[in-house]
Image (spheres, helix red, strand yellow):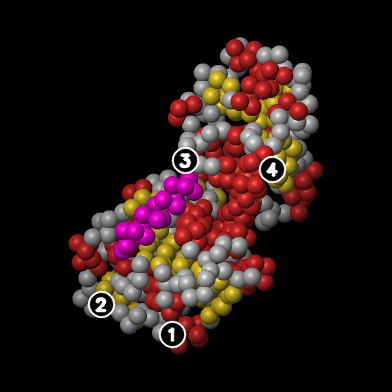
Amino acid sequence: MEFSIKNGNPEKQRTDCVIVGVYESRKLTAAAVALDQATNGCLSDVLKRGDMDGKAGATLMLHAVAGIHSERVLLVGLGKEREFDEKQYRQAVKSAVKVLNSSGARDAVSFLAELPVKKHDVSWKVAHQVEAVMDASYQFDCMKGKAAREKKAETARGLKKLVINVAARADLKPGEAGLKQGLALASGVSLAKDLGNLPPNVCTPTYLAEQAQAMSKSHGLHVQVLDRAEMEKLGMGSFLGVAQGSRQPPKLIVLQHKKGKKGQKPVVLVGKGITFDTGGISIKPGAEMDEMKYDMCGAASVLGTFKAIAEMDLPINAVGIIPTCENMPDGNAIRPGDVLTSMSGQTIEVLNTDAEGRLILCDALTYAERFEPSSVVDIATLTGACVIALGHHLSGLFSNHDALAKELLAAGESALDRAWHMPMLEDYQGQLDSNFADMANIGGRAAGSITAACFLSRFTKKYDWAHLDIAGTAWKSGKEKGSTGRPVPLLTEFLKQRAARG
């Protein structure tokens, strides 16, 4: 998709389609009014006939409208004007792209960025329009056969070029800045989606390490990959305990983006990278087990975020740590009842081998100490309990530092990638008591997402830390099955805000 920024009049655009908005009760936006005047009231006449009333997400395509240069006019419903906000704005963009991708239009000019969205400037509107367009246009078909891909190419339709119009010439510069931000974010989200959607026989720990190494060359990141022997020297007995049941070698991937001031303490992102999770000896039911390829979406979000901030050239120091392996029920796999010794020296009784994510994260969180971080955020598809608590709309947020939690919540609101601050009181820690080790790796069914966070908190005493449980938001099931790319938008916005603070 090709994007550009422009300032012009809607009636003068020589394009396949002009996109304008209509509020509920058939109220035309400023750009739609200009088109209506140029066409002697054509738009008003169409609306009076009742073909569209402006409800949010509704669309109406008009062809060969006299008095303008565009071949088509796409009317997009915006809902009630007084209630128009970020959500309705993004919905309008996605609705427009969906229609255009099934039409014969190859290029279009969008006047949606001219719409007022409370608390947001031109740069934000352009960035979000670009990211929403790319999100709505995303397809994953690289694993399909040659014949299927060739047939699709022959019958391919869809938008190839989008011009985003801004209201004034003074908006061109911030619009260009927004375009750069939006393209970078879309690039990071697409990478996270691709990695999540790849089958587990392709996206192995070694494959993730290779992708990180490729990014080091293309995006100027410093990347180090630790193998099993190096992790053994570090004493990562918890992480390696999970990995020992698989023939795929485990990897600890460390990325560094060094664009901040000298001496600036880095933000560390830690992403869970279980490339396939059978549950191990505590094996999962067979139904929908294929979706356990998505258990590395935390890792994918770290890689996607680092790609985004590298393309933005964000002035910040950041470190990404990705512990990655498979969780398999081999004869060498850990058993319920085994005791593992973590890198921190704390011992863990394994009561359920399907609670493996926390076992690899705890050693990565201890490893993060060496970077003397300003803060650490781990991202993990950690618990089904979080899905029960929050569904598929919000990621669960836990933290030992309220100010950090507020930063992440604010970033999620701005990025439209929201999280919810969950409790993590000392009262819950007792559920992790063990008769045979310093702690158990599960705390029972009650408050499962909270006790998982409490487990991780025992390895984060030396820095400000937050945990994002993305089990409900990282992918979709059913007809729309696929990775969402979340929480790359939240994490990127968080790092942007940190960079702006210096």
- Left or right: where 45 falls relative to 365: right
494 sits left or right of 225 in the view? left
Residues packed near mark 4 inside 10 Å, few (<14), some (14 to 19) or many (20 plus): many
Mark seen at residue 248: none
CA gap, disc 4 and disc 1: 51 Å
**Image disc number at residue 5:** 4
Q: Element type at marker 4?
A: strand
Q: Earlier in the sequence, mark 4 or mark 1?
A: 4
Whether 317 is drawn above or below 109: the answer is below
Residue 233 percent coordinates (x, y): 45, 88
Name, please, the residue furthest toward the front.
Answer: 170
Q: Who is closer to the viewer here, 194 or 64?
A: 64
Asked if disc 4 and disc 1 are in contact, CB closer than 8 Å, the reply is no
Residue range (magenta): 398-416
Q: Is residue 363 visible?
A: no
Asked if the stretch drawn in magenta spans residue 267, the answer is no
Q: Residues within 10 Å of mark 1 (few under 14, many from 20)?
A: some
Q: State if disc 3 and disc 4 touch (CB < 8 Å).
A: no
- The kind of secondary structure element at disc 1 is helix
User: In the displayed structure, does residue 361 sit left or right of residue 134?
Assistant: left
In whole angstroms, how far apart are the C-alphas of marks 4 and 3? 21 Å
Question: CA separation, marks 3 and 1?
Answer: 48 Å
* Residue carrying label 2: 438
